[in-house]
Image: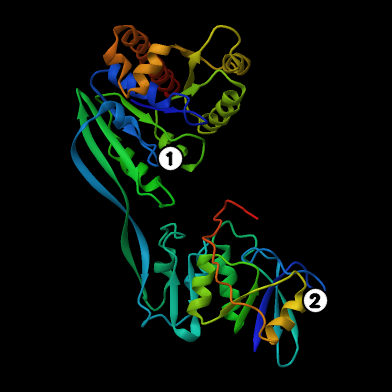
Amino acid sequence: MRIAVLSGKGGTGKTLVSVNLAAAAHKAVYIDCDVEEPNGHLFFKPAVIQEEEIAIKIPAVDNTRCNGCRQCVDFCKFNALASIKNQNKLIIFEEVCHSCGGCIMLCPEKALTEKEKVIGKIQKGMSDAVTVYTGILNIGEASGIPIIKQLLDDHKDTSGMPVFIDCPPGSACIVMESIKDADYCILVAEPTLFGVHNLNMVYELVKLFGKQFSVVLNKCLDGENPAEKFCIEKNIKIIGRIPFDTELGIINSNAEIAVRKNPKYGDIFSSLLETVVREVQHKHETTSHSQR
Amino acid sequence: MKIAVPVDEKDLKSKVCVSFGRTPYFLIYNTETKESVFLENSAAASTGGAGIKAAQTIVDNGVSALLTPRCGENAADVLKAADIKIYKTKSVAINDNIEAFIDGKLPLLDEIHAGFHGRGGN
């Protein structure tokens, strides 16, 4: 089962929830899809056993073959190419290119060929029985999607261990890519008005994707919780409440895993894990039932 | 020689546009024939790479010099490859800049910004 943990903004507790759920499951896979700023590895401190570079394909030009016909320039929706006809020169803007390959297919002179450009890497490591995958996008690169694709493609078959996907913040393309194949989504929310605004963004997203989902309320205090109110109004299931707790904050800010540090937190996340597993199985039963 | 200026409207009395890549129109002015042609900038509505596309338009029109308040680095790369010189406009009045250019009084634009790339900016 693949469980994606997401939120509309950074700092709500995606990594706290996904890291501790994976640790509570003992034998699990944790995938950090927040490739622009992966931080799950800071908690797991995995011994890296494997590293793989991720490259995208971009066009390269042989200016001796280019006759300036401009089919590639006119085709490119991202304006990644420019043609200087009187100089017999085609210019390619690598950072603007979205790797669609269309220019290469169209070029009647075969002046364009594919070349690889490394944009980041994936690290695999172990932390106790948790397999930790970290996607890292090189600074200055435009899109981490190819890295996320590769991270998740490796885990299509999840018959065995639960897989926890730590998503990037927000609700943009990189988040869509991260939740695309998830069986279940956990939305982490903060008890503030700003938090509600951001919760609404990811709520709209998981609804659009037809995902089974629920909310974990983080940093809960006594008194009114706007995020809780939002969930009640929208009839969204709340499967967990994590208290606003100094001790938990200290453990987390020291990059330690609460579940492994204090049995009190072990209990909180184990019971959350049980609820999630029950939810996912319940969903499977109802879908297989409706397919009959 | 032909020179290009990004302008707000199809009118010589209009103003020089603050943006090169996303200007609505280009004035192409021929210094010998004193002929003015206004082109719509098809790059203005691009989601990205507007500077590159706008520069392509300038190149395709056989322009020798561009008069603009500013220019991004991708656009400047295209213009440089085509040996088009970039001059910095000194005011918003189109005519003043054309006259100053003809008199050799416009400086070359030496500050090429890194581009806004979807982040706007003024």
Q: Callout 2: helix, strand or loop?
A: loop
Left of A211 or right of it: where is A35? Answer: left
Left of A209 or right of it: where is A121? Answer: left
Q: Callout 1: helix, strand or loop?
A: helix
Observer-nearest of A265 and A62: A265
Dot 1 alpha-carbon crowd within 10 angstroms: few under 14, some 14 to 19, many 20 or more = some
Marks 1/2: CA–CA distance: 49 Å
Where residue B15 sits, quadrant-wise, is bottom right
Vertical placement of residue A292 versus A35, above or below: above
Where, quadrant-wise, is the C terminus of chain A in this rendering?
Answer: top left
Dot 2 alpha-carbon crowd within 10 angstroms: few under 14, some 14 to 19, many 20 or more = some
Residue at the limit of the structure toward the left, as seen here: A49
Question: Which residue sits at x=20%, y=23%?
Answer: A129
Mark 1: which amino acid?
Glu
Vertical placement of residue B99 versus A29, above or below: below
Question: Which residue sits at x=48%, y=16%?
Answer: A219
Q: Chain of mark 2?
A: B
What residue is disc 1 on?
A177
Left of B88 or right of it: where is A96? Answer: left
Observer-nearest of A270 and A244: A244
Question: Which residue sits at x=33%, y=19%?
Answer: A20
